[in-house]
Image (tube, rainbow, N blue to C red):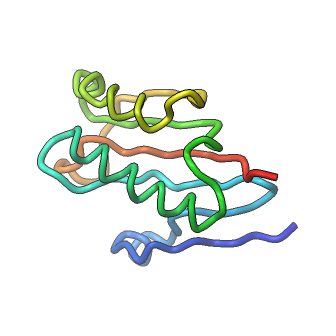
Amino acid sequence: MSIRRIHSGGAFEAKIGYCRAVVAGGFVHVAGTVGQGDDVVSQCESALDIIGQALREAGAGFADVVRVTYMLPDRAEFEPCWPVLAKTFGATPPAATMIECGLIDPKYRIEIEVTALLPD
């Protein structure tokens, strides 16, 4: 089985020792991704943009996502993201989990991780 690694060039990749996504066994595993912005909604949109780029580079898209995990330091901030998430996943929603936890830096309000199945 071949493994392909997709790097985004983000600062944490070199510091921590990971890559944005790994393509293996017919799946695309996208690492937990934070975005930029002043609030949770703008960070959610930014994180999804970064994830979308990794999925495209792997040959997949949001319609191929089968699992998503949302991590937020404050679960009350999750609901404002719902319209963005509903728009992103549309008629092909993945299985999802939301976890309330601390993130790598207090400025981050949401981290998103996805797994997608490569299309045939």
Q: Please tell me how many numbered marks the rendered image carries.
A: 0
Farthest residue to the left: give it: 38
- For the point 35% across and 29% down, the residue is 100
Residue 44: image location, x then y, percent:
31, 43
Does 102 appear above or below 16?
Answer: above
Task: Decide if residue 65 is on the left or right side of residue 38.
Answer: right
Q: Is residue 20 above or below residue 28?
A: below
Instruction: Report the side of 120 relative to 115 (left or right).
Output: right
Residue 118's spot in the image, x, y percent? 73, 53
Image point (34%, 34%), residue name = 84
- Apparent side of residue 49 relative to residue 69 in the rendered image (left or right): left
The location of residue 67, given as percent across then percent down, is: 60, 36
Q: Residue at x 38, y 55 (%)?
A: 49
Q: Position of residue 23 (x, y in %)?
A: 69, 63
For residue 66, which quarter of the picture? top right
In the image shown, does 10 or 80 lie closer to the viewer?
A: 80
For the N terminus, the image quarter is bottom right
Q: Nearer the viewer, residue 64 or 67?
A: 64
Q: Which residue is located at x 66 percent, y 55 percent? A: 28
